[in-house]
Amino acid sequence: MDPTKQASLWSVEEVLEWAQEQYPSYMNMLHKAIIKHAISGRALLRLKEHHLELLGVEDKEQQQEILQDLLLLRVQEEINELCDICSECFSS
């Protein structure tokens, strides 16, 4: 997985790699759900609590851990977009 690639552009395989790194103990459940629902980076960033329940993540602590990590990914994506905008403005 390319660490410089925006999460919204991740393939299903890259989402699987990220999930394996972040949640090795949940991977049995997550692996099947990610593949079954073809969760790409774009879909990953849009997951909410009720989506996690549908994917089989029923434990509230696990849900909160995943939701916090997803929020971090969203924030990183926003920061990258702002940096791109700023660099375009100042490069002219």
Image (spheres, rainbow, N blue to C red):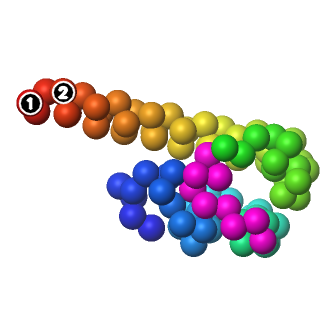
Q: Is residue 25 placed above or below 60 in the rendered structure?
A: below
Q: Position of residue 89 (x, y in %)?
A: 18, 27
Q: Which mark is drawn over residue 92?
A: 1
The amino acid type of the residue labelled 2 equals Cys
Q: Main secondary structure of the magenta part?
A: helix
Quadrant housing residue 16: bottom right
Q: Position of residue 63 (x, y in %)?
A: 79, 44
The span from disc 1 to disc 2 (Cα, nearest Å) is: 6 Å
- Disc 1 element: loop
Front one among 91 and 59: 91
Name the residue rendered at 13%, 27% in the picture. Answer: 90
Tell me the residue that label 2 is attached to. Answer: 89
Asked whether the viewer can see residue 17, the reply is: no
The amino acid type of the residue labelled 1 equals Ser
- Residue 3 belongs to magenta span: no
Total labels drawn = 2
Q: Is residue 50 left or right of residue 18?
A: right
Asked whether the viewer can see residue 86, the reply is: yes
The magenta segment is 36-45
Name the residue rendered at 45%, 40% in the picture. Answer: 77
Quadrant housing residue 54: bottom right
- Residue 37 belongs to magenta span: yes
